[in-house]
Image: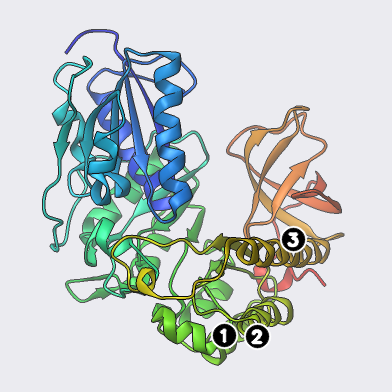
Amino acid sequence: MEQGLKASFYTFGCRLNQAETALISNTFSKADYDVVDIADQADVCVINSCTVTAKADADCRQLVRKVLRKNPETFIAVVGCYSQTSSDRLREIEGIDLIVGSNDKMNVLQYIETPAKRPEPIVVLNKLSRQPFTIENTGTELPTTRANIKIQDGCNFMCSFCVVPFARGRARSRAFWDIQREAIELTEAGYKELVITGVNIGTYEFEGKKFLDVVKMLLSVPALKRLRISSIEPATLDEEIFDLMRENEKLCNHLHLPLQSGSDKVLRDMKRHYSQDEFLRFIELGAAKVPDIMIATDIIAGFPTETKQDFEETCTVLSDSPLTYAHIFNYSDRKGTASSHLQNKVDPATKKMRSKILHALSEEKKTVFYKRFIGQILRVLTEEKDAEGRWTGYADNYIKVKIENSLNVQANQFVNVKIHEVGGEFAIGQTIATKRHKKKQDMVGV
């Protein structure tokens, strides 16, 4: 390999993609590439793609063209989900040199002997594995104080709107001991918070070990200070998780449980694995057992069979339940999914209107939740400075906090912050000197 080569990386989509980009980036670093920002000139640019929505596809194509406008000689590699499902579409884009599907994306460097522009792209699309897996390296190439740890890939649920089983294959789990190995290495490298990631992490199963076994094992890692669970299907999570949150201050009181719709009819059409009542009973139990818990969700606006009444039911669930906020996605047909064949789809203007209503409701609920903690003390892990030099970070329950008196604060540091106001996307406060933060069950923002 030539000396002094530079590589940049860009991630679209989910937290799992972020975890995988960190691992891929690490392989380039070990091969003596200098890892640079996507805005800088690089010899190689690796784009880890997403194909959950049509917008994600379009954003990927747009980024390819943007990079090439800045430096036409950059070797462009597009890897991951969009490559897996739409390699023919990517072949049409002039300037892409390498297209690697989901099965081989972690080994993308093996296909770049010399990063020189090609007249036609190399396409690597192999059958998606169904076997348990290990990961050879460690994802330490992240610019944050949180590290994502991949425990699982693929999904067997086959929801009618979802392309993920086609893009990532069927469910498979990472070797239990290999998760432990990377967790130890990440914490020894200085990461204080780990985030459990995967496609359908609640279905984890390896040699008799289940998801909660992974959680308990990670909580026992000596150098770990905080463990967070990323998006997890509500039907796969046991009520015991709330007891663990109460008992172990390392486990963040924060869950992201995709609802998708508040209408039982639409949930059936989506082929989801729970009813409205089952979802509500579960999150209400969580709010009762862990009073300061933040529970977020995903909602699809304008699913093909969603009527006005169905939409109103979804709004009621979001408004009246313990949900804190929602990520809103406009429904988008995905090739090969069952819902793409449904007739009489919701028109774009109605989808846009419903999305706008849900966004506004979500922001209102999030603000109300943040204001509950005015006057309370939150333990915050600092991440980055804002434009005015003030440190920002996240509390255990994922409240985003801005620290006003940041003079003696450093990155990757736990500080106790007393909240005095809410502004924009932040709870704002000042650091205070305390011997230790309160136990989670005593830190109720009421």
| Res 129 label | none
Quarter occupied by residue 176: bottom left
Q: Does the rendering let one see residue 57?
A: yes
Work out whether mark 1 precedes mark 2 in sequence or the reverse, and give the earlier one: 1
Q: Is residue 55 above or below residue 30?
A: below
Residue 405 horizontal/vertical position (percent): 82, 36
The residue under label 2 is 309
Q: Amino acid at mark 3?
A: Glu
Q: Is residue 322 above or below residue 369?
A: below
The residue nearer to you, when weighing 165 against 26, is 165
Q: Using residue 135 as the reference point, say whether residue 280 is left or right of it.
A: right
| 420 left or right of 115 in image | right
- Rendered residue at 57%/85% (across/down): 263
Q: Mark number for residue 263?
A: 1
Circle 2 sits in a helix, a strand or a loop, which is it? Answer: helix
Helix, strand or loop for disc 1 = loop
Judge whether residue 14 can be spotted in this image.
Answer: no
> Which corner quadrant holds the N terminus?
top left
Q: Secondary structure at mark 3?
A: helix
Disc 1 and disc 2 in contact, CB within 8 angstroms: yes
Which of the two discs, 1 and 2, sits closer to the camera?
A: 2
Mark 1 and mark 3 lie on one chain; the one further toward the N terminus is: 1
Q: Position of residue 236 (x, y in %)?
A: 39, 79
Q: Is residue 219 above or below residue 428?
A: below
Q: What number is the disc on residue 363? A: 3
